[in-house]
């Protein structure tokens, strides 16, 4: 499916929504917005071979990075993120480790180019913390959450030209069905796509709450009271499509496996089955070709105590592979 960029969204957004200032919360409050999952497990796997270079492909607010530094890592740490706002927060959070950490605004699918530009070859660890952070969900202006009314945006990279507004208002009913089915695993994907196509005839669907309302109304009456599940899956599907998340993940993993040093490791924490499936497939393919071994034959999951303390951890899965 080919996505398209539409000028009408740019005009509509300029006329109806002001761009928020970057990073509008008090520095130091990052733990309220994102708690890294399975940190101890990640530390044990990633630091076991005393790495000299760690590549954090999803730096986010810097939670893993801080944990690595506090655990005694003394090498070079490269933090990559396509969300510039998150990078700014991470830079402040990790100010005390500025001599060790580099901050790069880019998509991790470009990992080969990123490392070449940084003069890094055969790093010892790649770590991926996939999914969306509570920080990104917290601000309505980002358009990720259906619980707060804001513009239909969902771009991780605010410089990207394609938004959820573009997809919802311009893709065909068939294309929308594909997105909701493939990326959201939504049972009522056809009904939702059809209702969106009908609703936009009366005017553009421009806000998160309006889209949530349309999705809920598309559901059969008997399950409408459980509509938030379908809304969540549909929003996830649009976010994945807008940001090309699955293609980027697959491309990045392929490149990272080829760049890894001897006895180097790749550690991935995923939060839904589509991500985990890609990680599993790429790791198994690398093992079959030779030169790699799986350190997690099955994905590790958080302990019950962590899930109790952080409900977001419930769906997390951790996989690790090592280059022999």
Image (cartoon, rainbow, N blue to C red):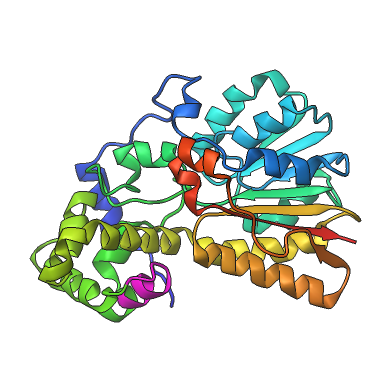
Q: Compared to 321, does 208 lie above or below?
A: above
Instruction: Give the x, y percent position of residue 223.
Output: 17, 67
Asked if residue 3 lies left or right of residue 93, the reply is: left
Q: Residue at x 64, y 60 (%)?
A: 299
Q: Is residue 184 magenta?
A: yes
Q: Identify the image quadrant of the C terminus.
A: bottom right
Q: Is residue 147 magenta?
A: no
Nearer to the camera, 303 or 287? 303
Q: Residue at x 74, y 54 (%)?
A: 266
Q: Compared to 54, does 221 lie above or below?
A: below
Asked if residue 95 lies left or right of residue 21, the reply is: right
Image quarter for residue 98? Answer: top right
Instruction: Give the x, y percent position of residue 204.
Output: 17, 60
Q: Can you see residue 2?
A: yes
Q: Can you see residue 104?
A: no
Q: Identify the image quadrant of the N terminus.
A: bottom left
Q: Compared to 179, does 18 lie above or below?
A: above
Instruction: Give the x, y percent position of residue 115.
Output: 77, 49
Q: Residue at x 42, y 68 (%)?
A: 183
Tell me which segment is drawn in magenta.
177-186
Query: Farthest residue toward the bottom?
Result: 174
Number of callouts: 0
Magenta stretch, main secondary structure class: helix
Asked if residue 13 lies left or right of residue 25, the reply is: left
Q: Residue at x 50, y 28 (%)?
A: 31
């Amino acid at each position: 499916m080919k996505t398209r960029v539409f000028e009408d969204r740019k005009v509509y957004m300029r006329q109806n929504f002001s761009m928020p200032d970057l990073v509008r919360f008090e520095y130091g409050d990052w733990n309220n917005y994102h708690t890294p999952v399975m940190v101890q497990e990640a530390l044990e796997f990633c630091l076991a071979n005393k790495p000299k270079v760690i590549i954090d492909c999803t730096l986010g607010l810097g939670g893993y990075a801080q944990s690595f530094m506090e655990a005694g890592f003394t090498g070079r740490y490269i933090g990559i993120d396509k969300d510039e706002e998150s990078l700014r927060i991470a830079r402040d959070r990790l100010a005390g480790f500025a001599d060790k950490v580099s901050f790069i605004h880019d998509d991790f699918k470009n990992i080969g180019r990123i490392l070449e530009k940084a003069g890094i070859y055969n790093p010892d660890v790649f770590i991926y913390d996939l999914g969306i952070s509570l920080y990104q969900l917290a601000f309505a202006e980002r358009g990720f959450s259906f619980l707060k009314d804001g513009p239909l945006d969902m771009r991780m990279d605010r410089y990207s030209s394609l938004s959820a507004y573009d997809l919802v208002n311009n893709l065909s009913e068939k294309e929308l069905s594909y997105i909701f089915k493939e990326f959201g695993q939504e049972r009522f994907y056809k009904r939702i796509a059809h209702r969106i196509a009908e609703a936009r005839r009366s005017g553009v669907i421009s806000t998160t709450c309006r889209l949530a309302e349309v999705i809920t109304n598309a559901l059969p009456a008997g399950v409408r009271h459980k509509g938030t599940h379908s809304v969540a899956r549909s929003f996830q599907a649009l976010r994945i499509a807008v940001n090309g998340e699955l293609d980027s993940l697959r491309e990045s993993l392929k490149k990272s496996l080829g760049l890894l040093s001897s006895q180097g490791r790749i550690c991935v924490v995923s939060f839904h089955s589509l991500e985990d499936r890609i990680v599993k497939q790429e790791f198994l393919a690398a093992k079959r070709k030779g030169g790699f071994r799986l350190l997690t034959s099955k994905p590790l999951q958080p302990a019950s105590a962590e899930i109790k303390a952080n409900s977001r951890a419930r769906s997390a899965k951790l996989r690790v592979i090592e280059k022999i």
